[in-house]
Image: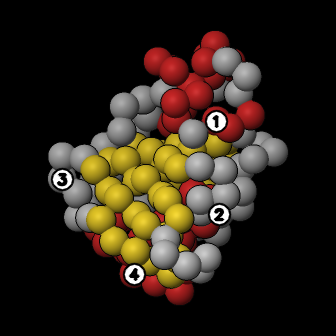
Amino acid sequence: MNQVVREAGLPEVAARIVSGLPPGAVLWLTGDLGAGKTTVARAVAAVLGAEATSPTFGLVHRYPTGAGPVFHVDCYRLRSPEEASEIDWAEMEGSRLLMIEWPDRGGAWVPPPTLTLRLDPGPDPDSRRLQLTGPDQP
């Protein structure tokens, strides 16, 4: 998938993403600061029945859903990849979904992605270009 989306279109895109993800999937959310990673994470969590908040101050958030927990990790505040060793990655194994913002900051501690969603500015301030890469993109 490579498309331009406005925020109003995120629920539809999130539903397409979720429909292609098996239980236990890892979704990397990449892009510059302010690109909309957390907004997309909220939309994806909502499709699964969870109300997500920004994990910026809590690093890891767990959202219960009927299909199993959804985890949302924001590695932005990590000063080095070694700090990612303090995250209980094993707790997140087998969850319905693990979404990771700024995965590059976690180094080798971050599990590999099932899919990677890259967000970039769109042609106008209210849009984003979404590029989804992975073996079985929806």
Q: Label 2: how many residues lie within 10 Å, few (<14), some (14-19) or many (20+)? A: many
Amino acid found under the numbered disc labelled 3: Asp
Q: CA distance from mark 4 to mark 2?
A: 17 Å
Mark 4 residue type: Glu
Q: Secondary structure at mark 4?
A: helix
The residue singled out by tag 2 in the image is: 52
Of the numbered discs 3 and 4, the one sitting upstream in the chain is 4
Q: Which x, y percent locates residue 40? A: 53, 65
How far separated are the C-alphas under marks 4 and 1?
Answer: 26 Å
Q: Are marks 2 and 3 in contact (CB under 8 Å)?
A: no
Of callouts 1 and 2, which one flags the residue occurring earlier in the amino acid sequence?
2
Reading the chain from its start, which is encountered first: label 1 or label 3?
Answer: 1
Q: Which mark is residue 12?
A: 4
Q: Quadrant of residue 7?
A: bottom right
Label 3 vs label 4: CA separation?
18 Å
- Residue on which disc 3 sits: 136
Other-residue count near label 1 (Cα within 10 Å), few / some / many at <14 / 14–19 / ≥20? many
What is the quadrant of the C terminus in the image?
Answer: bottom left
Q: Which picture quadrant has residue 76?
A: top right
